[in-house]
Amino acid sequence: MSDSTRLRIAIQKSGRLSDDSIALLKAIGIKLQIRDRLLIAHSTNEPIDLLRVRDDDIPGLVMDGVVDLGFIGENELEEKMLERQAAKKQAAFNTLRRLDYGGCRLSIAVPNEMAYENIKSLEGKKVATTYPFLLERFFAQKNVNAQAVMLTGSVEVAPRAGVADAICDLVSTGATLEANGLCEEDVVFNSKAVLIQKADALSDEKQALVSRLLPRIDGVIQAKE
Ligand code: PRT
Ligand code: ZN
């Protein structure tokens, strides 16, 4: 077993949040020894271990108390929270900081040739997405009867493939939508990366360490503004 006195932080192993999360940890003075293949990375100057996993696993690891902290996109965090609430699983956590990277929006997009006035235009339609809980909550709020169709990848080709009428996917520049003949219509959720902490109290030593790190994070973010 790992040393339980060391602060455990879950971080995306490889993807859009990895480099910025590592850069932030380094910028606040945490020295890290990362070996590409390994699940665990140790800090050489602070009692901190990184658990390097897929981003999909990070909300659950924090909510189950397996790790103390996690860096995660709010889109993934909110989706997993809704999924776990529906399954009556522990879904509590604390957000420590909203960060200055990982910005994107979860948006509904429809084929350019589709007549779209407002969200009601999706009544009775199928919408492909990797975020069915966020999308269904949006439909419920807007009083629209549409069906979320779960796809874990290639969401942007679903309308052309005849799998769905529209999509609901993450957008940053909009280039992917444009390349696939899709037009962004409604924003379902705005997202950034956040640093979260498990709901159960940390040991005094770990909490003291977290309290020492947070002002440094604030300093790094302010310096960039
Ligand atoms: O392997 P693992 O499961 O860890 O990674 P992943 O493939 O699930 O996630 P990854 O690395 O792609 O994204 C991680 C997180 O980055 C997301 O959950 C968001 O919080 C954030 N993020 C920010 C984005 C984007 N911007 C983004 N543009 N995640 C995905 N995209 C994709 C989007 O799905 C679409 O395919 O980029 C494409 C659109 O980009 P534009 O610029 O063409 O609009
Ligand atoms: Zn993922």
Image (cartoon, rainbow, N blue to C red):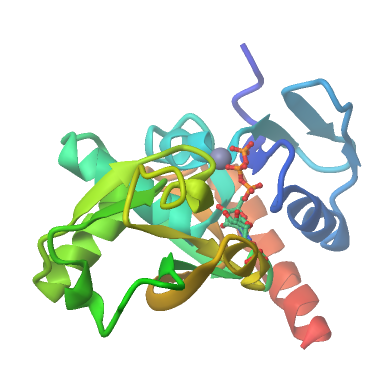
Q: Position of residue 151 (x, y in %)?
A: 41, 39
| Residue at the extreme top | 1
Question: What residue sits 47% from the left and 75% below the top?
Answer: 184
Residue sitting nearer the eye, 82 or 123? 123
Which quadrant: the C terminus? bottom right
State the residue lying farthest toward the bottom.
225
- Image quarter for residue 116? bottom left
Q: Residue furthest front?
A: 113
| Residue 186 relative to residue 57: left or right | left
**Residue drawn 40% across the image and 78% down it:** 185
**Relative to 220, is 70 above or below?**
above
> Based on the displayed image, in which of its 4 quarters is residue 52 positioned?
top right
Compared with 40, 71 (above or below) is below
Q: Split into 4 quadrants, where in the image is the N terminus? A: top right
**Rendered view: 211 above or below 53:** below
| Percent x, y of residue 194 | 56, 61
Q: x%, y% of residue 95?
A: 46, 62
Identified at 82% across, 62% down, the residue is: 28
Which picture quadrant has residue 111? bottom left
Q: Nearer the viewer, residue 176 or 103?
A: 176
Depth check: 155 or 97 in front? 155
Residue 128 screen position, x and y as percent:
36, 49
